[in-house]
Image (spheres, helix red, strand yellow):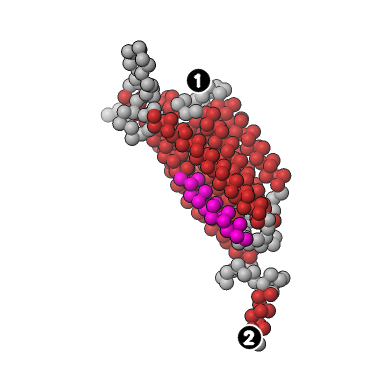
Amino acid sequence: MSNKVKSDEHSSAHGHGGRHPRLVHHFDSMEQQNEAGNFGMWWFLLTEIMFFGGMFTAYTVYRHMYFDAFAAASGALDIRWGAFNTVVLITSSLTMALGVYHAQMGNNKKLTMFLLLTVLLGGVFLGVKYIEYSAKFTEHIFPAASNFQWPPYEKPVAGHAETQQLADPVFTGHVKIYFFLYFVLTGFHATHMIIGMGILLVLAWQSWKGKFSKEYHSYIELFGLYWHFVDIVWIFLFPLLYLVDRHL
Amino acid sequence: MSEHIVSKKVYYAIFAALLIGTALTIGAAFINLHNFNIVVALLIAAVKATLVIYFFMHVKYASRLTKLCVALGFIWLFIIVSITMTDYLTRGWFTYVP
């Protein structure tokens, strides 16, 4: 008799009014469970806004104080890489959004594919960031460089004995502040992407194993929020870091 | 499930709008608008961010509670930046005469 009741409970799990097996006991319905998860994720994103907000505030203050140095330093970044990475990240947001769409449709294969595509685009972004960072390291323009100089260090050409004309130390110090903010902001942004890519790989694995369904896919949805947030941070970073006073 | 499913067409349209926004930002940066370069850059970025939040992040279809929560984040950010800048922007307005 008790066995019979159990099997009845199980068979009604997917039926109308029955409890979905993924519905935890303290929620009344899947809808309520999803809504609570969504709300919680947004609160987490608020702390993330505050996290990046502090650095954006520091940027605003120093850009206001040392605008000329910021304009000069910004010119040392390659707009083409910045623009390319912006497009890559926007595309990865699209693939993530399409991933969520296929999760909602219960199409696990396409979900897995779009999650992996998003990881791939994240990898491209980080690859470009690596190229940009190493260029700055070889030019000695990073905050901790003992031989930091402005304009950037140029390899002496054979036969030309002339030395580089350097900016005055105060101005160079202001340029250094720009690069400090550049590395911290893009560094933390990249850290968020690396963490995101790790989670994406786990989600792709789980989706391949068939964990998600039309009714149960809130992890995908919530992770999508995180990924789009990281995209938004870059949408602001690109003009603020790469496009200071480019018209000169 | 009463969950709102955004159609693929909407996603592609937003994607196109974001690409256009990126092109506009770069174009605007090379035009000399004096002090308004930063205003234009931030306006375009804000529009792009709003599109992402509204459609990619489904806030357009979310509950009013979620909408309030999202708005709060940006209101607090605005408070942080603006109150900090009331200090830095007003320095040197008055010179101290002993």
Element on which disc 1 rests: loop
Q: Residue at x 34, y 28 (%)?
A: A148
**Horizontal and vertical percent for residue A181?**
41, 36
Quadrant hosting residue A80: top right
Q: Give the residue pinned by disc 1.
A: A248
Q: CA distance from mark 2 to mark 1?
A: 81 Å
Instruction: Give, as a three-letter code, the residue at label 2.
Output: Ser
Q: Does A244 appear above or below B76?
A: above
Which circle marks residue A2 in the picture?
2
Residue at the farthest bottom position? A1
Earlier-in-chain disc, 2 versus 1: 2
Indicate the position of residue A15 as horizontal and vertical percent values: 71, 71
Cβ–Cβ below 8 Å for labels 2 and 1? Answer: no
Location of residue A22 (image quadrant): bottom right
Most frequent secondary structure within the magenta stretch: helix
Q: Quadrant of the N terminus of chain A?
A: bottom right
Residue found farthest to the left: B98
Q: Residue at x 51, y 24 (%)?
A: A246
Is residue B89 at all visible to an observer of this figure?
no
Range shown magenta: A191-210
Say whether residue A47 is visible: yes
How many other residues sit within 10 Å of disc 1, few (<14), some (14-19) or many (≥20)? few
In the rendering, at what x and y percent does residue A155 appear? 37, 21
